[in-house]
Image (cartoon, rainbow, N blue to C red):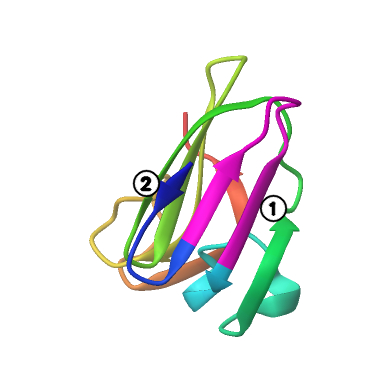
């Protein structure tokens, strides 16, 4: 489980990833609730096999059991990588490495 200023994300033992709080710029990985309050845990879109998760203000990173790293949310300083412009939003998880 990881918590940031306004959101929480948790990896369950079955590898699914769930988030709740303020979906600021997609930091909960669900474009359907972009920038809205999500008061109860909801699944992160397309995530399975999660083994670890990290959260910071406005973005989330997830490590999968296959060793890949995924990111979503607000790319304020280039932390989401892959050539995404600074200050761009990535509301759907995308593989970084």
Q: Residues within 10 Å of mark 1 (few under 14, many from 20)?
A: many
Residue 31 in picture, x, y percent from top left: 69, 71
Relative height, residue 97 to residue 67 (above, below): below
Of labels 1 and 2, earlier in sequence is 1
Determine whether label 1 and label 2 are within 8 Å by CB.
no
Q: At 73% across and 60% down in the image, what residue appears?
A: 42
Relative height, residue 39 to residue 93 (above, below): below
- Asked if the stretch drawn in magenta spans residue 56, the answer is no
Q: CA distance from mark 1 to mark 2?
A: 19 Å
Task: State the mark number for residue 44.
Answer: 1
**Which region of the structure is painted magenta?**
8-20
Task: Give the secondary structure at mark 1.
Answer: loop
Q: At 49% across and 75% down in the image, what residue appears?
A: 25
Relative height, residue 22 to residue 97 (above, below): below
Q: At 38% across and 67% down in the image, what residue appears?
A: 58
- Using residue 21 as the reference point, say whether residue 17 is left or right of it: right
> Where does label 2 land, which residue?
81
Which secondary structure type mostly characterizes the magenta part of the structure? Answer: strand
């Amino acid at each position: 489980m990881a918590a940031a200023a306004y959101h929480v994300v948790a990896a369950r033992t079955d590898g699914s990833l769930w988030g709740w709080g303020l979906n600021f710029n997609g930091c909960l990985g669900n474009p359907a609730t972009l920038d809205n309050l999500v008061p109860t845990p909801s699944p992160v879109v397309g995530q399975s096999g999660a083994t670890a998760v990290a959260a910071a203000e406005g973005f989330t990173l997830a490590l999968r059991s296959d060793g890949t790293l995924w990111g979503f949310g607000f790319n304020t300083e280039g932390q989401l990588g892959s050539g995404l412009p600074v200050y761009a939003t990535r509301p759907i998880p995308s593989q970084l490495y």
